[in-house]
Every structure is written in C-alpha cells, then in structure tokens.
Amino acid sequence: MIIFGHRFIPGISLYHVSDIDSIQNTPPSSTLYVPFCEENLDIINHAKENDITLALSVENINEIIYSSSLEASYIIVSRELASKAQNIANNYLFDAKILVSIEEEQEIQEMALLGVDGVIFSNAIVKINS
C-alpha cells in the first residue's frame, strides 16, 4: 500500500497548482496535484505533453475513467468511491494508482481491507501559487 503524508513514512509531496505558470514554482520531478475539471484541462494536457507526473482528484466514475485516459499516475478519490474506483482500475488494468483521501490513521486499515492501492493525508498536498 502506498501512503502519502504519514508522519512515520517520508514520502513525496504532491504540488497543487492552479495554472501552468505555477508549475515553474514546483521542485524538479514533482508530482502535480490537480482537481479534475474542464477548467484544468490545459494544466492536465500540459503535464501529459511534458511527461510531468500527475495526480488527479476526482468526484465520480466518469472522471476516474477520464483520468486514466489522460495518463494520470494517481487518481485520488473519496472513501465513498474507493471500492468502485479500485474495482474499475483492476478490471481495466489502469496504470494509475487509486489513492483515497483520509484524515485519520484508523482509515488505513479500512482501505487496506478494501484492497485500495494507497491513501493520502491532506498534509501531503502542498499549495503552489504562481
């Protein structure tokens, strides 16, 4: 299981960008965090064209499918979508890993029992301004 943002496990941060210009303010080889929406397609396509690792936060099954097609490395879902998202990813052999947003350590066990690829605590997401 992948764990982002836990105090015991040093790991990479995801950098929340709101426009293409703010990508310049991220460290080299960073993973960008972008909420999936039509307004962010320019950032998503820029990341894809420039081989930048991308984590997309989604809200429904359609967005899960789109994220995989747009070559996201990580697809971040809510607890409510976790099981369905992981089943879809396994069924269609996604390259992307399904991450579930969590707040409490106790949720790690629940997500592990569901077979989810990983979890992410909110402190693993760093907001970047342009």
Image (tube, grey):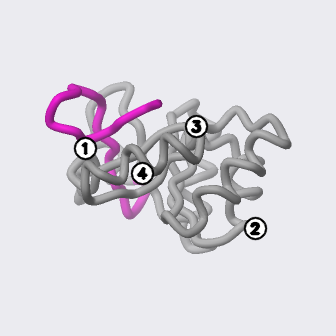
Residue bearing the label numbered 1: 25
Which amino acid does the dot numbered 3 rest on? Ser
Could you tell me residue 62's position as x and y percent? Answer: 75, 67
Callout 1 environment at 10 Å: few (<14), some (14 to 19), or many (20+)? few
Q: CA distance from mark 1 to mark 2?
A: 31 Å
Say whether residue 119 is left or right of residue 96. Answer: left
Say which quarter of the image contains residue 119. top left
- Magenta stretch, residue numbers: 1-20
Q: Nearer the viewer, residue 90 or 19?
A: 90
Q: Residues within 10 Å of mark 2 (few under 14, many from 20)?
A: few
Q: CA distance from mark 4 to mark 3?
A: 10 Å
Q: Earlier in the sequence, mark 4 or mark 1?
A: 1
Mark 3 Cα shell of 10 Å, populated few (<14), some (14-19), many (≥20): many
Pointer 4 residue: 33
Residue at x-position 22% and y-position 39%:
6
Residue ID for mark 2: 62
Above or below for 8 versus 20: above
* Residue 31 magenta-highlighted: no
Position of 45 compared to 104: left or right? right
